[in-house]
Amino acid sequence: MALHLEDPRIVEFDVRTDEMLVNMGPQHPSTHGVLRLLLRTDGEVVSQVIPHLGYLHRSAEKIGENLSLPQWIPYTDRMDYLAGMNMNLGLSLAAEKLVGLEVTPKAMVLRVLIAEMGRIASHLVGMGAYGLDLGTFSPFLYAFREREIILDLFEEVCGARLTYSYVTPGGVTHDLPAKITIPPGLAALIGKPNNLQLSWLEACGLFLDWLEKRIPEYHTLLTTNQIFIKRTAGLGILDREMAISYGCTGPVLRGSGVDHDLRRDGESIYTRMYAGYKFDVPVAPFSSAPPECELGDNWCRFYVRMMEVVQSIRLVRQAMEKYPTAEGEHRLPFKQAQKLPKREVYLETECPRGQMGFYLIGNDSNVPWRARAKSSSFCNLSVTEPLCAGCLIADIPAIVGSLDIVMGEIDR
Amino acid sequence: MLLNRGRDLRFRPTLISAAIFLSLKCGEMNFQDIHSRLVSRFGDRITGLNAENIDPWIEVAPQAIAEVSAFLKSDPDLQFDGLNNLSATDWFDADPKKQAKLGEPRVEVVYHLYSFSLRHSVVIKVKLPRWQGDVAGQLPEIPTVSSVWGIADWHEREAFDLVGIQFVGHPDLRRILCSEDWEGHPLRKDYEFPLEYHGIRAR
């Protein structure tokens, strides 16, 4: 009897395989938190992936309906906990859009500076953790060494290392400190004395100089590494139409060749922050890509993130130049008791993982009637099911990792 | 290295380009255009609009939403290929005086659409009764749009889970954030937190 094989990789001549359900997670290290993937497998081939979420659900939206907007800011830190600054910024801008408040030029410069530093820190984790997913440990250590200094600098600004609540409606909570002791990590890396006193901006500049030289190292470690290319290029191909239909945003969308970045194409309340800044938006395909690479594959998504780090360094440098001449206070009053007018606003901002949206409904009270957080990782994760169908089990971490999800943001 | 040049925003706001930019973004003209286009196509199934809101919205009859969505996506002048956000709101207050300020008790489903090719956006709203046929516990029904936008699948599951809306025709409508045996829909304004869940004290 002739044997008909649907998938040539299923070898049924010698070894008889049966369909098996495999639970991956919720404690699996490559699921970036507590995500459970239910895999329907036949041997090594995965025919279906069913993601199960909600393990980190903390009813952030319900809590938001019972708090004033400045009080809800700390909850946004805990959504995407790798990019707290950017999440704070998203809600603050939505709140300002709702009440019609415009922040000072100084607050805008500070916001650009801090949001882009946050983006660098977040992409560093994205890069390191992706290496970890694929079985290489060293990029993770380098990435965390660099991120540590950014966290030190953030700590000097607002006192927190992870959950900042720094950007608030009306501006930012503190101005940059005039004198700090050099972060110990930075002092060790660039060979300066431990007790060196300098301004925050000088420390930031020293760090950027140092980080910029490290980027070629990351490329040799991962981007152009043959093993890495074999594991990522040509795999998990997400085409343009599917990326748009599934609401993918950020590096996932740009990795599929859609030239869209809210810092440039968003609403004016957001883009005016970036007015006068020069930056490029990296979009696949890349001429420097290895020949195995295809538009919208894992490698493209990863490379978009790497290129965005370079652009963020550019933006931080420009913000540092603008800071001394920026006018106004760093913060305008936005009281806890501030009445939210009876109207509805929706605003998306470009977070490191994609477009984070906040939908707020005011009802003549200081508490919003509805506070909705549309998560970018949520949408990016929804594409796993079509993306992983027919791949090998070992490729699941490579594909899910390339989406760079954070479960805190997905489950809210 | 092939990088797309970021548009330098300093050189953008000439008067004409600013006017075009505004009308494309969320300008009244464009919103009115979209509205009149929908009215001419769907007639009285477009039930209203609010042009005063910062993000103006168009109201659509519940039964027409799937058709309207397919039209919004496929029409060459509209091309809303992206569903940025789908969410639902419960407009209910146990206090009749406060309810009077909110209007009719209802549930609203909101669709924030964006066109990646034409770079414009629109908000679509659907008003539903809080309970189907006013029978408490009977979830209000609305056709699914998951065949139009892939992401609507998960967004609708979330709206079903948290707000309690039955999306008719959805391929796999089950809870997404709460566990499968959770009771009630937490974002309903009259939701009461359970005293315990599987022996775990909940409040």
Image (cartoon, rainbow, N blue to C red):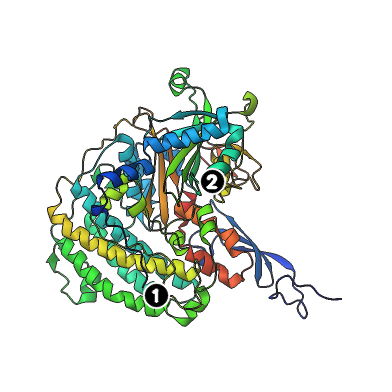
Quarter holding the N terminus of chain A is bottom right
Q: Chain of mark 2?
A: B
Viewer-side residue, B85 vs B107: B85
Instruction: Specify the amino acid type for callout 2.
Output: Lys
| Residue placed under numbered mark 1 in the picture | A139
Rendering coords of residue A192 (x, y %): 17, 75
Rendering coords of residue A85 (x, y %): 32, 53
The vertical placement of B89 against A156, above or below, is above
Could one spot residue B161 in this view of the protein? no
In the visual, does A227 lie left or right of B197? left
Instruction: Specify the amino acid type for callout 1.
Output: Pro
In the visual, does A318 lie left or right of A234? left
| Residue placed under numbered mark 2 in the picture | B73
Marks 1 and 2: same chain?
Answer: no
Rendering coords of residue B94 (x, y %): 49, 23
Residue sitting at x 51%, y 71%: A294
The number of discs equals 2
Q: Chain of mark 1?
A: A
Q: Residues within 10 Å of mark 1 (few under 14, many from 20)?
A: many
Residue sitting at x 35%, y 42%: A94
Viewer-side residue, B183 vs A364: A364
